[in-house]
Every structure is written in structure tokens, then in C-alpha cells.
Image (cartoon, helix red, strand yellow):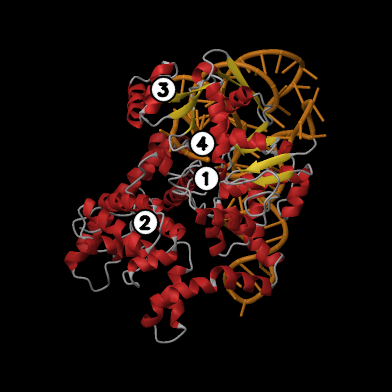
Amino acid sequence: MENVRVRIGPSPTGEPHVGTAWITLFNLGFARSHGGKLVLRIEDTDQERSRPEWEQEIMAGLRWLGLSWDEGPDVGGPHGPYRQSERREIHRAHAEQLVRDGQAYRCFCTKERLDALRETQRANKDRLGYDGHCRDLDPAEIDARLTRQEPFTIRMKMPKTGDTVIHDRLRGDVTFSNENVDDQVLLKSDGFPTYHLANVVDDHLMEITHVIRAEEWISSTPKHVILYQMFGWTPPVFVHLPLLRNKDTSKISKRKNPVSIMDYKQRGFLPEAVVNFLGLLGWSMPDGREIFTLDEFLAAFSLDRVSLTGPIFDLEKLTWLNGKYFRERLTNDDVARLVTEQVFNPAYIKKIMPLVRERIDVGEQFIEATDYFFKGDVDLDLNVLNLKNKGAKDVRVVLEAYTETVEALVDFSPDALETAARAAAENHGWTTGEFFMVLRWATTGRLASPPLFETMSVLGRALVRRRLRRAMAAFKQGPDSRRDRPRAETKATVETALKAMATTATAGAPAKNATTAPDAGADADAEAEAEAKVKAKLAAKAARRALVEALRATRAIPEAAARLEIPVEEVEQRIHDFRVRPIEWQAPEPRG
RNA sequence: GUCCCCAUCGUCUAGUUGGCCCAGGACUCCGGAUUUUCAUUCCGGCAACAGGGGUUCAAAUCCCCUUGGGGACGCCA
């Protein structure tokens, strides 16, 4: 293969994402192994959400990992500009050209009409998609509406019959019936192109030979192929990699995983270890080696060794790998440097200092006062939160609402955080004092901290989000859905239960005091003790019920029955009789 | 709902032209050894070809169906 050119197109709408890094790594691997070039193209066609700061962050994140590109907005190159917002005229001209050629048309449908259309289609269980309302408008009407300056989009005119076949380097030919593909918007009413137009036009102009991207794009590839045909261009080779997954196997998301590269940096991961780990997802060395450098990866890379199953992004192995590097590849000085630069980062400490200076008397107290600034998770003790008249669900609902807002916050400033918090409290019937305490507890693990919103602002988006999500989980009463119950966790629960059952069986009778009675305190009066006992009993009961439910959902009960050579009913009975610890997702209802 | 993709231990994977695979490695977990403790390291163990049909002398590997998981269906990318 000659003159291989591949590209990555991150969208500057958020923190640098591990998925972006992963795709970049594979693109770079392909480019290097063919003596080709990697282009970095910023896909900032979403005016609402794109921010120049994110563009910088993304490039910084990729560079931190040691990933580099041959052409891009920062390094230049012969096919610029490399920022799609600066290529708007090119995209617009191409869209207009398709309109002139009768391959695309102006669509005056409003957002409201499209929403209503979708709703109806959903209600009638019809195929979703644009109905072609403006596809054959009378030219005179179009002119009239244009002179009236009605906003419009440009849509491509998909063929209504026939098939479109896409050739995927990894999956072979994939055939789509054109009737299932609707008329995609190419140019938005703000004059910016959509991904589909920009990506096809730019890939062609930048002479991209291979489009290596994630699986989520497969279903829009026929649109891209048709666009290439409309322009009379040769499409590139398509390579659809699998999608990285959360533990519950859904597409990886910031809601369920720490996905920000910078988060790993701040937590003291080694870029080499992170890259090594990414190279282990969906790919393997021909000789089975699991520890390798970026250069070794790039030299050995081949698409033929890509696995098509969506790998779960699991931190355990990454952590082990990082430790391996600490122990075997780094010197004391290396690790010392890493810790001082990434964990005790001077700039970060400088931001923390004004928050704690007046609260400490001696330098060493800094450690005690600020530990939560330096770890991923904090200890969340439900018992210290004294919530009056608020149940677990109330907490979850308000935290969920607040987290949604905060995640979308452009400006992660104390003021913005506070405004959002006041709004959330008011909307959900909380006093600010009560809600702010929950936030403080969730983000710092403490009931006392420096000014809350300044603290959160310094902690940063990734850490705050992570902790808010975790706090919500702590208030979860039993598995709400299968998605909320990771498989590994289920398996662990099952094993614990089986072991416990074995113990119970040998001991003859169920253990009597294995409950998790909250420590009532040695000198508590009888009434409080009785109350605590009842509460513990209820908690344990709920835990057992949930456990049986969890076990039923798996094949564990029949398996256990077979193994212990007893009837299924007996297994269930034994589980029922056994006093288990309330497990993680059944934190007892907070008091009140 | 429609279309598409995927399917080996809990997780990452080897297995790429069917036989050397009653399936190998790594993480996790459990045992043991070394270590004043802990961690490390070493040794051992648990654990998978989703199910059902075919094709074949022979299938984890090829085909079909079922099931399961995922994605797309946005004036987001």
C-alpha cells in the first residue's frame, strides 16, 4: 500500500477521551506500519458545544500519552486548515453543488415538525427517519421561502431503491437497503456542515486512504458511500473498530467510567502504562507479549490482529500494569518525579493552598486537611449524613439532576457550580443547607471542608463527576435494573454466597450474629439498641431478598444445587436462612 | 419498532489456511513458599468455546437458526 493516510477527528466538546486515545493509537499503528501519515483534524462543527480550550486539552492529552500526528492544526501541513470550522466555505460550496446537481435539496422543516414526526413514528412503531417532506418542493415555493429568509438545511437525496454495499476491511461487505436510509442533513441552518458532509469532503480533500473509526459509524456509512458517489469520488477503505465498553457492556461513557485521559494523569498513572493497556484492548501481540512500549506496538501493529468484540475498559489490569512499570521499568527517581509532577502537581497545590491555608497551623497538617484532593474516591459513610425527611430516592434524584447540569457546565467555576446547586435544591424541594451538605459529603467525604464550590471547582470536573456518581450509587436501594448490576459483581456475590452456604452447612445452623448491626455503641441505652437491632434485621432481610433475586438472574442456583447435590428449593431456602452482609448496592436507607 | 455489528474463563485475550485444543496466557480471586510486617516475587488452584441444528473422517474454528450483548435511527460527533 502506498501513501497511506489516516486521520482522527476529535470533537472539542469535552475532556480528552480514552476512546479517542484508543482510536488514535490504532490509526497511528496503521500509519506507521505502512509508512503513512496520521492527520489530526478538529471536528468543531457543533457551535454550541465546541470550545477552543477542549481542543488544547485533547491535543495535550494525546501528547501526554506520547501519541503524535504528522499534520494538524498545531503542526500544520499541506492539506489545511485542519479545523473544520475554518473550512466552512468549502463544505457549504460542496453542499450547494449537490443542490445544483439535483442530488440534494433545501429543507425548511422546523425542529418542531421533526420532533413531532419522530414522536409519531415512535408511537406507531414505524421506521424512524426523515419523511422527505421537502424533497420535492416546487421551485417557485423554494424561491419564495428563500426571499422570505426562512431558515433551511440542505439534505442529501438518498436513492429510494436498491442497496448500498459498504466494504469493511474487518467485517467484509455489509449491505444496506437504501429504503432504510433517510435523507441526511448535510448543511445545518447555521451554515455549518454536519459530520457526514464535513467528513466525506475533508477526507477526500485531505486524501485520506483509510477511515479507521469506531463501530458506531457503521450505520451511517452508506450515507457516506452515496456521498462519495454523488461527488464522483473514490471512497476510502473503511475500518470499523469495536466500541470500548463499560463494565455493564454498554458503550463506554463518562457516566460510568473515568474516561478523561487527564484524570489518569492526575491520579498518577504512567502514560506508557496507559498506552500499553490501550494496546491490549481489541488487539494482541503476535507473540502474546503483554508488556510493550508504544514503539513496539507501532512496529508490530496489524489490522489482522484486531478483535471485533467490544472490550470492556477495566481498570484492574491497567492498575496492575502501572504497578508493573513502577516496579520494573522505573527508578525511584522516575516514580518520585511522576508523583511530584502528576499527583502533587505544583500548579494544583497552588490552587488548593488558598482553600486550606487559614485552616492549618503547621505544614504537615496539609496532608490531613487535603487528602481528598489527591485520591480518586473518598470514603462515603452513610451513617454520618443526618438527613431529615429525605430518603435515598430523594438524594439520588437531586444528585442526578445536579450532576447532569454540572457535566454540561462550560465554565466549571465556583459561581456556576453554586448557581446550579441552588437551582437543583429549589427544584427538588431541598433547603440549600441540606443539599449543600450532601454535596460536600459526596465530593469530599467530609462534613467540613473549605468553601464547597471553590473546593469543587479546584477538584475539577472529572473528579467531581466521579464522586457524585459514586454517591448516587451509595444511595441505590437494590438493583434497579440489570444494567446497574455489573456481571463481575454478581459473580462475586454468588461466590460469597456459596462459600457462606458451605460454612453454614458445616456449622449445622445459620450463623446467628453475622448480621451487620450498626455498632450501637457499648453504652447505648436499651431502647436505641432494640431499634438498631430491628433496623439491622430489616436491612439483612432486604439484602437476602435481593441476593436471591440476583442469583436467580444467573444460572448460579441450579449450579449450586447440582454441586451440593440438593434440590433447587433447598438452595434458595439456605440462602434465605443465611444472614448475609448487606451488599454494596443495598446501602441501608438513611435515617429519617 | 426498523436496520446493522458482535459472540472463547468474571475481565483482557491466544486460537487466524478446520485436526498438535477434553482450549493456552494475563488480570482478578483462592491456596502455598520466600519475606521480622505489608507489598513484591515464585509455585499451585478455581474458571470459558451461549444453545440447537447441519457440513466433515475430524469444528472453538465453516454454514443456518435461536438466544444474548452492542450500536445506529439528531440541524451531536
What's the chain of the residue with tag 1? Answer: A
Residue at horizontal 37 percent and vertical 68 percent from the top: A454
- Label 2 and label 1: CA atoms lie apart by 33 Å
What's the chain of the residue with tag 3? Answer: A
Discs 4 and 2 share one subunit: yes
Crowdedness of circle 3 by 10 Å Cα count: few (<14), some, many (20+)? few
- Label 3 and label 2: CA atoms lie apart by 57 Å
Q: Amino acid at mark 1?
A: Asp
Discs 4 and 1 share one subunit: yes
- Residue indicated by mark 4: A193
What's the chain of the residue with tag 2? Answer: A
Q: Is residue A571 visible?
A: no
Element at label 3: helix
* Side of B38 relative to A474 (left or right): right
**Quadrant in the picture for the N terminus of chain A:** top right
Crowdedness of circle 4 by 10 Å Cα count: few (<14), some, many (20+)? many
Q: Earlier in the sequence, mark 3 or mark 2?
A: 3
Residue A102 in picture, x, y percent from top left: 53, 19
- Residue indicated by mark 3: A143
Q: Residue furthest front?
A: A147
Q: Earlier in the sequence, mark 1 or mark 3?
A: 1
Q: Amino acid at mark 4?
A: Pro
